[in-house]
């Protein structure tokens, strides 16, 4: 008992340590940069995004001010391209510690097409995403009660629609609020905070001056709508900038510098926690909910399986030592021992497909585990854009060895002969489905001129990674799998399959499969809400320590439920457990996919067909991956369990 308590204490300490890493530190995306007073602080612009359309757009597609010499792309990694980022330079001139008051940036006269395009993007709720020193711009706005409120994810809106007149207005002025910190022992200053307060102002020059938008005189002429040497305040706005054809829009900006005690290493904390908008107690509730579910299920499994199995095994082994006359006097055998000659019979339907799916699920499951672990310790921080996507691709390729090994070991135990086809399908089935769907969506996105459309060169890189790295690694794993001895089974399979008796309603396989996924889904649905919000609503997700705990609990719950249901199927003399174990555990993905339909209402999606296609198409892929992971775990756990229990009884 003392040893058990010691093990539980160690496990609790380890769990707490992992959870604490979710917000303990992060590996910065760039090294600190010290700016000297007056030094240029570059501001970059990223793609325009909208949660209502899920179609990121190029910033300079709209009639905004352009930098001298035209926009230039910033260097990006593969993960940034795949996630729709398109970072470019901007015309805004910002210098360290230099205050700017209502500086004219440019003037744009809207054509009819430009006015319609701008109004449409405002209607769909598109947001600007600006970056200074690798910090995304937070959005400063007003609440319904008039209080200032800051949102640190998702950027700031490009305009608004009046609630009463339904007219469209553009945010053509921005107050750029920057915070700096003086590190000890350093001469320069570090940027530790960046926020943008957008405003809509119908600018006019003093004295009735009309600017042509090109002469240098317009940059120095005073604006009647701006107070001299004072930062713009919402209370001083007399009229908003209406979006209409032939409107002369003057873009202006203020820059405000403020000292902050926030250190450079912790400047991302407020972004990741959204200034504690979502209390940590919510995630602890999620963990507590998951732990209670798995504890209840574990106690149920122990109380049913251990007690019943001990009784069954003792009874079966006692029968084995009786003489023939004594056996005739005993009651007829019943239960799972009766199927000993059929329980390890290969699946009668699609045995190769079973091996392919279990191998693919093992690969995805291990890839997800490595990715979540690296994120939990900070190696894949949101400060490093695209790092999560890049790491997922790399881990998936490297885990191809496991997919080939698992599928080959199973296929060899099934005495399959088409091992080349099995290995090739393991290497190409799931990634091929993903790649084809990705190409299909990428083609459509290209017609919409969305930045989510990946350039052709990056598609070639993806294809090369798949063909030259992933597929060879799968064949390498299969080579070692086929070289090993076949999986040994404790019983001999008969030539003729035993007939399966007609089950009762609750023992029907379809009923068990339908109900099995409910318990694992209940253990993970709270954290799933935050993951979905981060994935589809441009929010930062950083509590990967909690994700690791929920992921582990999900897998444990799937394994326990599947083992319990397989035991009852064997007791009902149903020896066809291979596919049952896979679908029973994998049904968790079906519940997740159904949940995604209800969650979709949170997006308040546009009526564009492409939005529905993107959301449900990619959710289908995610749930397919989840189905393979949980299904393969259930099948492998059931195989281990059934080998164990049949290895403990004496069979004639």
Image (cartoon, rainbow, N blue to C red):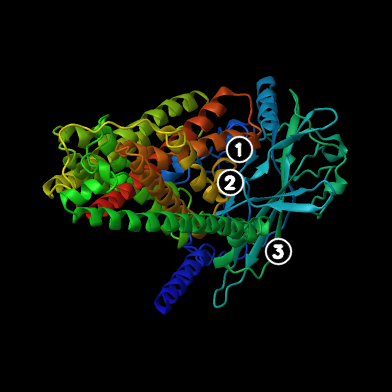
Q: Disc 2 designates what residue?
A: 529
**Quadrant including the N terminus:** bottom left
Q: Which mark is residue 543?
A: none
Q: CA distance from mark 1 to mark 2?
A: 8 Å
Label 1: which secondary element = helix
Q: Are marks 1 and 3 in contact (CB under 8 Å)?
A: no
Report whether residue 397 is seen. Answer: no
Given this view, does label 1 or label 3 mark the residue nearer the observer? Answer: 1
Given this view, does label 2 or label 3 mark the residue nearer the observer? Answer: 2
Q: Disc 3 designates what residue?
A: 258
Of residues 217 and 640, the one nearer the viewer is 640
Q: Residue at (18%, 42%) from the top-left corner?
A: 413
Q: Are marks 1 and 2 in contact (CB under 8 Å)?
A: yes
Q: Residue at (67%, 35%) from the top-left corner?
A: 125
> Label 3 crowding class (10 Å Cα cut-off): few <14, some 14-19, many 20+?
few
Of residues 39 and 618, the one nearer the viewer is 618
Q: CA distance from mark 1 to mark 3?
A: 40 Å
Q: Are marks 2 and 3 in contact (CB under 8 Å)?
A: no
Percent position (x, y) of residue 557?
Answer: 45, 51
Label 3: which secondary element = strand
Percent position (x, y) of residue 71?
Answer: 53, 39
Q: Disc 1 designates what residue?
A: 599
Residue at the outermost top position: 112
Position above or below: 517 against 20: above
> Label 2 crowding class (10 Å Cα cut-off): few <14, some 14-19, many 20+?
some
Mark 1 or mark 3: whose residue is earlier in sequence: 3
Mark 1 or mark 2: whose residue is earlier in sequence: 2
Of residues 204 and 577, the one nearer the viewer is 577
Which of the 4 image quarters holds residue 58?
Answer: top right
> Label 1 crowding class (10 Å Cα cut-off): few <14, some 14-19, many 20+?
few
């Amino acid at each position: 008992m003392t040893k058990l308590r010691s093990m539980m204490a160690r496990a609790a300490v380890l769990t707490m340590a992992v959870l604490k890493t979710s917000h303990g530190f992060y590996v910065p995306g760039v090294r600190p940069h010290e700016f000297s007073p007056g030094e240029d602080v570059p501001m970059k612009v990223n793609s325009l995004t909208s949660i209502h359309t899920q179609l990121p757009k190029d910033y300079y597609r709209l009639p905004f001010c352009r930098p001298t010499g035209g926009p230039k792309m910033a260097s990006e990694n593969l993960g940034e391209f795949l996630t729709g980022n398109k970072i470019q330079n901007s015309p805004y001139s910002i210098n360290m510690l230099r205050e700017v008051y209502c500086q004219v940036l440019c003037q744009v006269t809207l054509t009819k097409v430009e006015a319609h395009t701008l109004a449409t993007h405002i209607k769909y709720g598109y947001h600007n995403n600006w970056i200074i020193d690798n910090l995304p711009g937070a959005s400063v706005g007003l609440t319904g009660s008039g209080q200032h409120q800051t949102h640190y994810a998702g950027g700031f809106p490009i305009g608004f629609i009046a609630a009463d007149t339904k007219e469209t207005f553009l945010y053509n002025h921005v107050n750029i609020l920057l915070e700096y910190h003086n590190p000890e022992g350093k001469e320069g200053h570090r940027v530790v905070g960046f926020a943008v307060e957008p405003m809509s102002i119908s600018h006019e020059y003093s004295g009735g001056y009309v600017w042509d938008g090109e002469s240098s005189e317009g940059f120095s002429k005073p604006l009647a709508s701006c107070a001299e040497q004072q930062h713009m305040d919402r209370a001083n706005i007399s009229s908003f900038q209406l979006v209409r054809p032939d409107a002369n829009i003057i873009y202006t900006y203020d820059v405000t510098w403020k000292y902050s005690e926030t250190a450079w290493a912790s400047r991302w904390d407020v972004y990741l926690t959204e200034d504690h908008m979502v209390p940590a107690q919510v995630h602890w509730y999620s963990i507590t909910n998951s732990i209670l579910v798995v504890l209840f299920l574990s106690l149920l499994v122990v109380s049913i399986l251990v007690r019943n199995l001990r009784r069954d095994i003792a009874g079966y082994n006692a029968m084995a030592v009786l003489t023939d006359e004594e056996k005739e006097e005993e009651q007829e055998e019943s239960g799972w021992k009766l199927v000993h000659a059929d329980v390890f019979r290969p699946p009668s339907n699609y045995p190769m497909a079973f091996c392919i799916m279990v191998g693919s699920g093992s690969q995805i499951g291990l890839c997800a585990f490595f990715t979540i672990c690296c994120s939990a310790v900070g190696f894949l921080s949101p400060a490093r854009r695209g790092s999560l996507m890049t790491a997922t691709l790399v881990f998936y390729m490297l885990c191809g060895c496991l997919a080939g090994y698992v599928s080959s070991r199973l296929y060899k135990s099934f005495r399959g002969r088409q091992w080349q086809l099995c290995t090739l399908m393991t290497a190409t089935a799931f990634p091929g489905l993903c790649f084809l769907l990705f190409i299909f969506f990428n083609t459509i996105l290209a017609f919409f001129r969305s930045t989510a459309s990946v350039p052709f060169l990056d598609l070639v890189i993806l294809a090369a990674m798949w063909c030259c790295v992933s597929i060879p690694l799968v064949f390498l794993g299969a080579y070692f799998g086929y070289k090993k001895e076949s999986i040994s089974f404790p019983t001999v399979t008969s030539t003729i399959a035993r007939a399966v008796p007609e089950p009762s309603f609750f023992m029907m396989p379809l009923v068990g499969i339908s109900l099995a996924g409910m318990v694992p889904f209940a253990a993970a649905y709270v954290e799933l809400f935050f993951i979905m919000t981060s994935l589809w609503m441009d929010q930062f997700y950083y509590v990967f320590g909690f994700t690791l705990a929920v992921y582990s609990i999900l897998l444990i719950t799937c394994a326990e439920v599947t083992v319990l249901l397989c035991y009852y199927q064997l007791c009902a003399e149903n020896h066809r457990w291979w596919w049952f174990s896979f679908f029973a555990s994998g049904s968790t993905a079906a519940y997740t996919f159904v949940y995604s339909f209800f969650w979709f209402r949170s997006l308040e999606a546009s009526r564009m067909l492409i939005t529905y296609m993107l959301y449900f198409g990619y959710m289908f892929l995610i749930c397919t991956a989840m189905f393979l992971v949980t299904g393969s775990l259930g099948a492998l756990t059931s195989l281990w369990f059934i080998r164990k229990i049949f290895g403990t009884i004496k069979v004639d």
